[in-house]
Image (tube, grey):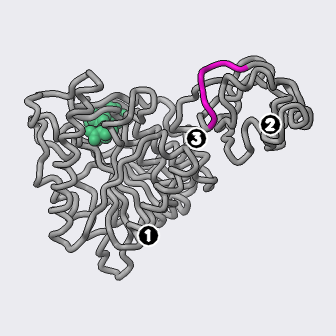
Amino acid sequence: MSDDELAAGRAAVIAARRIVVKVGSSSLTTASGGLDGSRVDALVDALHESALARPAGDPAEVVLVSSGAIAAGLAPLGLTKRPRELALQQAAASVGQGLLIARYTQSFARHGHGVGQVLLTADDVTRRSHYRNALQTLSRLLELGFVPIVNENDTVATQEIRFGDNDRLAALVAHLVNADLLVLLSDVDALYDGDPRKPGSVLISDVRGPQDLAGVAIGSAGRAGVGTGGMVTKVEAARIATEAGIPVVLTRAAYAARALRGDPVGTLFHRTGKRSAARLLWLAHATAPRGELKLDAGAVDAVVRRRLSLLPAGITAVSGTFVAGDPVDLVDPSGRPVARGLVNYDAAELPSLLGRSTRDLAVDLGPQYEREVVHRDDLALL
Ligand SMILES: Nc1ncnc2c1ncn2[C@@H]1O[C@H](COP(=O)(O)OP(=O)(O)O)[C@@H](O)[C@H]1O
Ligand SMILES: N[C@@H](CCC(=O)OP(=O)(O)O)C(=O)O
């Protein structure tokens, strides 16, 4: 990448009109783990000054993805650190999410901004109708001039349908709302080539693609008990967003205003790909498959190369427990996943249909059996 291209990357940050900002628990809590109102205020001030009320007269829209529900719920429940048990994490999130939103509501109101709470699960946003609803709610909030504050719906997300980290959730939300920029705010000022607490680690200012991450030691969370994914989930989130055409700035929450103004702080992950249909990204990155359909070579070619729907005739085996609408993996004859899709049949219905043409099935069983097993619009190649 030339100097001009590097400069163009920074220019894209300054020009961004719709921005998803993700803030981690470690940037919103006190050393002892409670919600720190002054840090919430400082973040909101930065968002107001550098995005929502930009002096040049071109305010940007902001979607805030905020962690901190579990951390905010610890003290009221008499806990000193993040519990391991899922139900207790969910109880803490349930107590803390209200406190978190109340604090944001108060803080944004100082600048005349209203907020709306949006709680999402991975499962919600992969199903067509829920996905559309999530997008409509977010779009309408932005049109109304409100700041959507997104978090994972921790209280209903079971282990298998959890994102577990808001970094990936933020990347997917950025794609969902067609954002121009994703800003990941943490307690570290940038990505380093090794543990930032160790002397000699070097700050990485630009990541132009996977080649710039070769040899980088990407570690887990720094402050035990507060953050979740550490740098691993941030780099993964940056990969998801940049491959989908959205640049990412990673920096410390205290530098939020500077990052939004386009100052050269933190690490800029340059976009590596082009935009693609939003829902398919959710399908590939946010779902856990409930089963597997094994394809013959002809079906693999039809689905992967010719981008066609999957019909019963090309399936040789079915495994897993799923119902119509669930995500399943399509695997090639050697068992390697080639695509993920939303299946149109229950697992119990499929075995008797395998290898048969849709015309035969319609004649024998009725016209409802003429449908594809996975429609091409519901398929994401892996
Ligand atoms: N290569 C690296 N560069 C920067 N930070 C790193 C790296 N490897 C691990 N980390 C750690 O990741 C932590 C941030 O992750 P986390 O605590 O989960 O943050 P958050 O709560 O903001 O999501 C940093 O405090 C840092 O100690
Ligand atoms: N949904 C959880 C946040 C999980 C999470 O990703 O935390 P973090 O690593 O601090 O961004 C909560 O609100 O506590």
| Residue 369, numbered circle | 2
Callout 2: SS = helix
Q: Earlier in the sequence, mark 2 or mark 1?
A: 1
> Which amino acid, mark 1?
Arg
Q: Nearer the viewer, residue 326 or 289?
A: 326
Q: How many marks?
A: 3
What whole-number distance in Å separates the C-alpha atoms at marks 1 and 3? 26 Å
Residue 201 shows in the view: no
Q: Is residue 38 above or below residue 314?
A: below
Residue lying furthest bottom: 57
Q: Position of residue 256 (x, y in %)?
A: 28, 57
| Mark 3 Cα-neighbour bin, 10 Å: few <14, some 14–19, many ≥20 | many
Q: Quadrant of ligand 1?
A: top left
Q: Residue at x 66, y 37 (%)?
A: 341
- Mark nearest the camera among 1 and 3 is 3
Q: Which residue is mark 1?
A: 17
Q: Would residue 299 appear left or right of 104 to someone viewing this image?
A: right
- Mark nearest the camera among 2 and 1 is 2
Q: Position of residue 290 (x, y in %)?
A: 58, 26
> Which amino acid, mark 3?
Leu
The answer to whether the residue labelled 2 contacts the one labelled 1, judged by CB atoms less than 8 Å apart, is no
Residues in magenta, as a range: 318-324
| Mark 2 Cα-neighbour bin, 10 Å: few <14, some 14–19, many ≥20 | some
Residue 278 shows in the view: yes
Q: Is residue 312 above or below residue 171?
A: above
Q: Residue at x 41, y 61 (%)?
A: 19
Q: Would residue 279 appear left or right of 354 to someone viewing this image?
A: left
